[in-house]
Image (tube, grey):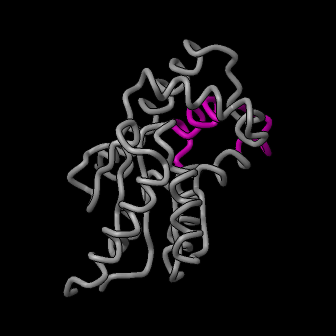
Amino acid sequence: MKKSIISINGFPGSGKSSTANGVAKALDYKRFSSGDFMRNAAISKGVSLNAFSSMAEKDPSIDYMIDAEVKRAGTMENLVIDSRLAFHWIPESFKVYLVLPSEIAKERVLNNLKENELRKRSEYAPTRDEVYQKITERLASEKKRYKELYNIDHTDKNNYDLVVDTNTNTLEEVIQLVVKEYKKWQQLEN
């Protein structure tokens, strides 16, 4: 049975948060970010996001805690969630994956770190090369953990209902496309 939930995943810097915020606003839906939840958890432990990811490799309870929040969010309706594993934990959601070349992702993430206080406190990196290294390390950690814990690959585009290149589309175009395709998906028989 389909739920009125849109789950958004994608490469770091691809616009998950911006897209989720815009889609939630366009549909007048609530919003949940497992990334922000994880950043706050890292800050509460006094470590960077990358250090927290490394800790999660040795302590599965960290991922279980985050997964529990995603599952809880999955009991809601009229929700847009950006999360690496929401496609898995909320299979009845409309699943979106955002792609972006890593060179452009470096720049976007660096700019976002300068502008977003939560991100700055949890994953600060002063140069594009350091940003890229942190992105690469975090993705490798997540891919390893999710494979070991759940035998899934969150980057496999076959897991998603819609894949959007955020380099060839403006943010507004991405939001409009997600809303349009979501409404079509809702009309399809369960």
Residue 42 or residue 100, whichever sits in front: 100
- Residue 46 among magenta residues: yes
Report the quarter where the C terminus lies: bottom left
Q: Give the residue at x 42% y 62%.
A: 176
Report the quarter where the N terminus lies: bottom left
Residue 60 or residue 23, whichever sits in front: 23
- From the image, give the main secondary structure of the stretch colored magenta: helix
Q: Which residues are magenta?
A: 42-60
Q: Give the residue at x 61% y 74%.
A: 30
Q: Is residue 114 above or below residue 88?
A: above
- Residue 8 among magenta residues: no
Instruction: Write down the quadrant of residue 32 in the picture.
Output: bottom right
Residue 158 or residue 141, whichever sits in front: 158
Residue 116 x/y as whole percent: 73, 40
Instruction: Write down the quadrant of residue 186 in the picture.
Output: bottom left
Residue 129 x/y as whole percent: 55, 12
Q: Give the residue at x 57% y 51%.
A: 18
Q: Is residue 117 left or right of residue 80?
A: right
Q: Is residue 53 above or below residue 178?
A: above
Residue 133 x/y as whole percent: 52, 18
Q: Is residue 44 above or below residue 100?
A: below
Residue 145 or residue 163, whichever sits in front: 163
Q: Is residue 120 above or below residue 154?
A: above
Q: Is residue 57 left or right of residue 87?
A: right
**Numbered label tally:** 0
Q: Give the residue at x 63% y 36%.
A: 52
